[in-house]
Image: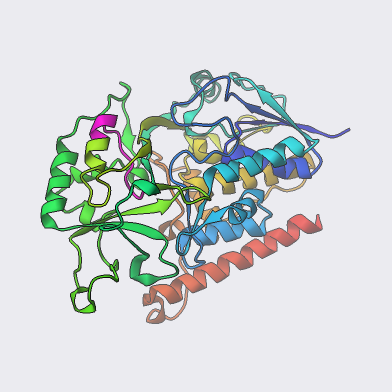
Amino acid sequence: MAKKVRIIGAGLAGSEAAIYLAKKGYEIDLIEMRPKYKTGAHTSDYPAELVCSNSLGSTDLLSASGLLKEEALRLNSTLFKVAKQCAVPSGNSLSIDRFGFCEEIKKIIDSHSNINWVNEKYEKIDPTIPTIIATGPLSANELANNIKEEFGEDNFHFFDAIAPIIEKDSINFDKAFWASRWDKGNADFINCPMNKIEYENFYEILTTSERAPIHDFEAGYFEGCMPIEVMASRGVDTLRFGPMKPVGLFDKRIPTEFKKNQFYAVVQLRQDDKQANLYNLVGFQTNLKWGEQKRLIQSIPGLENASIVRYGVMHANTFINSPKILNKALQTNKYENIFFAGQLTGVEGYCESISTGLFSAINMDRFLNNKPMIELDNQTMLGALIDYITFKDHQKLQPINSNWGIIKEVEGDKKKLKDKKYKNELRSSRALNVIEKIKKIINEE
């Protein structure tokens, strides 16, 4: 008789875990509260919905995000394989048709005889049943409170923000132009340039606009997904050195001799759907009131008549105190049947959610078959993420993306290691060697 596993939450982490374990022959109850119960961010009833940007980050193995994706692919990630099939043009990053992607994941889940979709709200942990909890940063209050009761540790809170999306046909290409930074790859981004006066007008609107109210509990902003108005409050030039930096962006319609320091600031838009009808504003996560957002967006040269199909919103995210609750297999210290995965553990980002969903499923499989569970150290990007969120001496865990700062340093010629590219080549090669050894262990057993 096949063993049964519950997967709570059909987001990126839960979908990855469910598909992996179903392929291993387990009977899966995939429990998802949508569409019966809504969240503040999801817009569809599909599994694996991308609620913020449609970008999964760089594909370059010398980037932290690119390395993490490759590690997961080598460990047999289904979601990253599907993401590559649903890619839309965006230079050297993996951006996808978000609805095409989640439709494809739904087909895989619906067609697998081992997966039973259960549309209900999961409110209370049953430690007698093997379970992976991957309800994400928008977990139901009932479950969040039950986690607090079971593990005796309060959840932390922070706010996450979503960027607006506009219709491409409403963009004025007399002002906007196509380009990728430093002309790398194809010219996949729409760029709206500003001069100094235009930027100062934009900045004035942004910093004086009214914000939507937020919930009344103590919260912090996650640095990797900060509202643009909060970023702007740090100084008039903060955006020009952040999401609106003009460096490396050139309008080829302008004579070559004027290319140096061509623009004062630039707003970039990235393709959001397969048909290339919709584009999101890169780095424009916001909590401004919708009327204020429209006024702000239409102050951008080229977007004077922008048709906005989704406004930016902000919502509260929650995550557990992983250093106290989890071991490095993503299993809880208190209940050996219970694992956690995804953003609820304190990782931040799509790739991080998918990868931890996969890792929790790998270890659930090994646990149920009485095999030693896999623990990765910080030589790999996935291992470094898990090492970080489970580090016992954290004074206060904050959400973390994949980044080179958390991965173990490499040894070698100190002079050569000053070259960032050379250093990342060594770190990437070392990480993939470790992953290949883990892959061999999993496949042979």
Task: Provide residue 270's location: percent of width, then percent of height.
Answer: 40, 53
Q: Nearer the viewer, residue 64 or 59?
A: 59
- Quadrant containing the N terminus in the rendered view: top right
Residue 4, quarter of the rendered image: top right
- Is 281 or 392 nearer to us in this picture? 281
- Looking at the image, is 83 positioned above or below residue 30? below
Query: Where the C terminus falls, by quadrant?
Result: bottom right
Residue at 66% x, 38% y is 106
Percent coordinates x, y for residue 57 in the rendering: 46, 55
Q: Which residue is drawn at 77% across and 38% down?
A: 112
On the rendered structure, is 360 left or right of 281? right
Front-most of 101 and 431?
101
Residue 314 within the segment the image draws in magenta: no
Decide if residue 75 is in sight here: yes
Q: In this view, does 220 lie to the left or right of 427?
A: left
In the visual, does 59 lie left or right of 300?
Answer: right
In the rendered image, residue 286 lying in the magenta stretch gets the answer yes
Please, what is the dominant secondary structure of the magenta stretch? loop
Where residue 261 appears, as percent x and y from the top left, is 19, 69
Q: Is residue 391 among the parts visible in the rendering?
A: no
Q: Give the range drawn in magenta.
A: 281-293
Q: Residue at x 23, y 78 (%)?
A: 256
Structure colour scheme: rainbow
Relative image position of residue 8 (x, y in whole percent): 62, 30
Give the camera-side residue of 132 and 192: 192
Q: Which residue is drawn at 53% across and 44% down?
A: 98
How many numbered tags mark residues here?
0
